[in-house]
Image (spheres, helix red, strand yellow):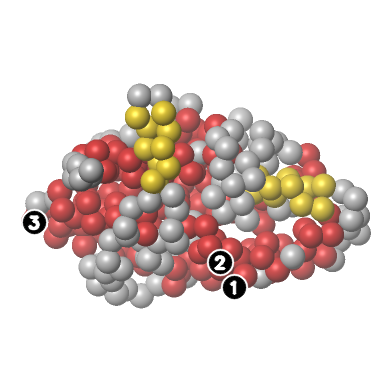
Amino acid sequence: MTARPQRPFATRQRLHAALLAVLSVACTGAPLVHATDVDPTADAVTLAAGYLNHHPDINFRMKALRDYNKGEYEDAIPRFQRAAFYADKPSQGMLGEMYWEGKGVAVDRAMAYAWMDLAAERGYAGFLNMRERYWSQMDETERARALEVGQALYAKYGDDAARPRIDAKLRFGRRSTTGSRTGFSANLTIQVPMPDGSMTTIQGAKFYDDKYWDPKEYFAWQDSIWEDPPIGRVDVGEVEAVREAPSAALPSRVPEVVPETDAAEPEVPEDE
């Protein structure tokens, strides 16, 4: 039987649903990649270990998702921006969707494209697809403005500026935890956030593994999850997992800029 062609609107809705599904796993308890019901921002052992303090990308993304799922979009935006400041591509993608949909901000399709272009900087298929769909729906005035505002975003949030920040946090975190007097026994279990927002349980002895602290290994771990994520589709109460062929890995349309490595952190609301 010949498959029906996918409508652009339906395809974008599926991509949007997939982005939220994967990112929201820690907040919703969805059964993805080693998910558990533990909230790492409230887990005593994880907090004592200092894991989240040294992984601001995941820490602020998860806090932003809690706000988002409660409909507190105006609080979610600065927290996604703080995560994005530390090279978190999923948070940059969420900011793109929020500007496109007008959640917590006025609809701004040029700014939405600029954020999604940042999210697609490493060639992750899901974000590339979203970026190209944005571009196809924008007029020439919006496209020109997207490339203009995109330069400011790349200067502050692009990998050339953001990766050194998270790299420094990871290295400092490893030195701080391994140099402390409170080591972790092999019998102790710790809840560690995965790059996709889900949780995994590890033994204390594994807490110092390179993939949690070495910048090169840490980003290879992220790449393994985000390079080709599943796309979720919801049809009349039934969830179906599908995969879409990724868009061609087109380079960014935004002109290259000088990275602002000394930019100030975005301010965030105080935790309740």
Q: Dots 3 and 1: beta carbons under 8 Å?
A: no
- The reply, left or right, for residue 113 in relation to residue 262 is left
Say which residue label 2 marks. 219
Q: Which residue is mark 3?
A: 140
Which of 15 and 43 lies nearest the eye of the viewer?
15
Residue 58 screen position, x and y as percent: 57, 51
The label on residue 216 is 1
Contact check, label 2 and label 3, Cβ < 8 Å:
no
Q: In the figure, is residue 16 to the left or right of 272?
A: left
Secondary structure of the residue carrying tag 3 is: helix
Q: Quadrant of residue 44?
A: top right
Q: Residues within 10 Å of mark 2 (few under 14, many from 20)?
A: some
Q: Residue furthest left?
A: 140
The tag on residue 176 is none
**Does the residue at mark 2 contact the one at mark 1 (Cβ under 8 Å)?**
yes
Q: Is residue 242 above or below residue 129?
A: above
Residue 127: x %, y % from top left: 35, 55
